[in-house]
Image (spheres, rainbow, N blue to C red):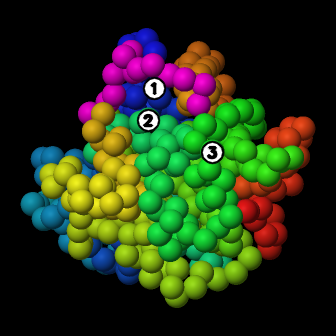
């Protein structure tokens, strides 16, 4: 169990909170590039770490992320006109550039310097791959741009989606490093999902329902190893990297693409689940991309024009008791992503961890909580830069490997866990 005060520290991410300040040390996904498809496209509401903002792309293609509300009377700039190099408030015509600087106040004399003294809070917005990233911390402490492999490969080798999850970020993230649930909750998907089926590793998953967990420290976070019996002289290891604060990579299956996630707090009761697939050595096939768009693998089918899943808590995730009885979906819920979100949301907006009873299979979760708490408190105490900020910490991979029973998993897999351009991923 976790003390209530520690649970609150880890789950509260608003301005001024220890965990909120921790998240503000990193470049984090703010939105998908597809949400601002062209110059002067409509602005997009963005809420991150409990701050309400607007993202827009100006006439020259520059991206901006600024306070949602006009400095004049507090009207939402979402109603504004994106035109001629800035966003103009619909109420009284005040206009702001991508840095939040006021550039026109029509009611003031032309020779006035009033605009120079009006600037909205703003953050950088940078396109890397198909994601627009932001850094919400102090400008003089801004780290180098992120170097995660999924955003570095050629466009045809990667696919990314996002969905709104109605729970705190922490319980979503903890599901991402919990490999023991795969043999239960996702057992149907291992047999039928086109982005999972056919791999030899699936047999190991289903034949051993009692994985042994071993956790190793990494410069940027952790490596969580789940060991299952393979042949008589070997073990099947699925190794999940976690890069702080909330980036994880799912171990691959066969020649299927590598999956992964970023969980980003919207506020304390909601988060964005960014989910991606990429292949380090080949383009994704048309069949694979079609499956991803249809909500297979780690992706979801969303309500058109939104990022809310079609299957959500309002319709009980379209649960099918007959499919559950037939064994198609262990929980009766279709799709890997929705299977996860349905149970994580069922815990409530913020799960009460003082009531939980953890077991040895939760070793990765326990260690991650400890590392998050330590980093947040060290940052608060003396400004210590947390793990995962350095781009060198981003160059990791997940791996699925069969090793001799006497082999140490981390030492034997170092090469497989290092991302290098053009190198095949280690998979079974």
Cβ atoms under marks 2 and 3 closer than 8 Å: no
**Residue 170: mark in rendering:** 2
Residue occupying the point 38% across, 81% down: 38
Residue placed furthest toward the left: 91
At label 1, counting other C-alpha atoms closer than 10 Å, the crowd grade (few under 14, some 14-19, many 20 or more) is many
**Residue 134: mark in rendering:** none
- Where is 118 relative to 307, above or below? above
At label 3, counting other C-alpha atoms closer than 10 Å, the crowd grade (few under 14, some 14-19, many 20 or more) is some
Q: Is residue 405 left or right of residue 369?
A: right
The residue tagged 3 is 208
Quarter of the image containing the C terminus?
Answer: bottom right
Residue occupying the point 41% across, 25% down: 17
Observer-side mark, 2 or 1, equals: 2
Residue occupying the point 31% across, 55% down: 324
The residue tagged 1 is 10
Sequence-wise first label, 2 or 3: 2
Q: Is residue 90 left or right of residue 57?
A: left
Sequence-wise first label, 1 or 3: 1
Mark 1 and mark 3: span between their CA atoms?
33 Å
Tell whether position 185 is magenta: no
Observer-side mark, 1 or 3, equals: 3
Nearer-the-camera pick, 190 or 352 = 190
Mark 2 and mark 1: span between their CA atoms?
7 Å
- Label 3 element class: loop
Q: Which residues are magenta?
A: 348-361
């Amino acid at each position: 169990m976790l003390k209530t005060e520690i649970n609150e520290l880890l789950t509260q991410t608003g301005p001024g909170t220890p965990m909120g300040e921790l998240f503000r040390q990193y470049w984090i996904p703010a939105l998908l590039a597809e949400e601002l498809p062209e110059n002067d496209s409509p602005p997009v509401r963005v809420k991150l770490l409990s701050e309400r903002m607007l993202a827009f792309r100006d006439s020259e293609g520059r991206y901006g992320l600024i306070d949602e509300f006009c400095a004049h009377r507090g009207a939402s700039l979402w109603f504004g006109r994106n035109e001629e190099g800035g966003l103009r408030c619909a109420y009284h015509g005040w206009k702001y550039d991508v840095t939040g600087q006021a550039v026109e106040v029509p009611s003031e004399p032309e020779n006035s310097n009033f605009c120079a003294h009006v600037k909205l809070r703003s953050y950088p917005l940078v396109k890397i791959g198909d994601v627009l990233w932001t850094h919400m911390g102090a400008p003089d402490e801004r780290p180098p741009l992120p170097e995660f492999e999924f955003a570095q490969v050629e466009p045809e080798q990667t696919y990314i989606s996002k969905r709104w999850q109605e729970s705190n970020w922490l319980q979503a993230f903890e599901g991402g490093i919990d490999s023991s649930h795969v043999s239960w909750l996702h057992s149907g998907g291992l047999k039928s999902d086109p982005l999972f089926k056919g791999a030899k590793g699936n047999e190991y998953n289903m034949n051993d329902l009692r994985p042994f967990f071993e956790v190793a420290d990494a410069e940027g976070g952790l490596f969580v190893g789940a060991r299952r019996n393979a042949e008589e002289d070997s073990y099947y290891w699925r190794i999940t990297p976690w890069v702080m604060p909330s980036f994880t990579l799912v171990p691959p299956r066969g020649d299927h693409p590598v999956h992964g996630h970023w969980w980003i707090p919207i506020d304390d009761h909601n988060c964005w689940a960014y989910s991606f697939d990429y292949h380090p050595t080949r383009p994704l096939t048309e069949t694979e991309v079609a499956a991803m768009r249809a909500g297979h693998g780690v992706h979801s089918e969303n309500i058109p024009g939104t990022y809310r899943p079609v299957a959500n808590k309002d319709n009980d995730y379209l649960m099918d008791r007959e499919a559950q009885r037939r064994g198609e979906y262990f929980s009766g819920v279709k799709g890997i992503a929705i299977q996860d979100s349905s149970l994580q949301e069922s815990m409530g907006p913020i799960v009460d961890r003082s009531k939980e009873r953890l077991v040895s299979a939760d070793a990765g979760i326990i260690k991650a909580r400890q590392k998050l708490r330590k980093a947040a408190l060290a940052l608060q105490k003396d400004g210590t830069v947390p793990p995962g900020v350095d781009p060198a910490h981003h160059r990791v991979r997940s791996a699925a490997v069969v090793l001799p029973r006497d082999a140490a998993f981390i030492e034997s897999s170092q090469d497989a866990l290092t991302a290098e351009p053009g190198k095949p991923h280690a998979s079974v």
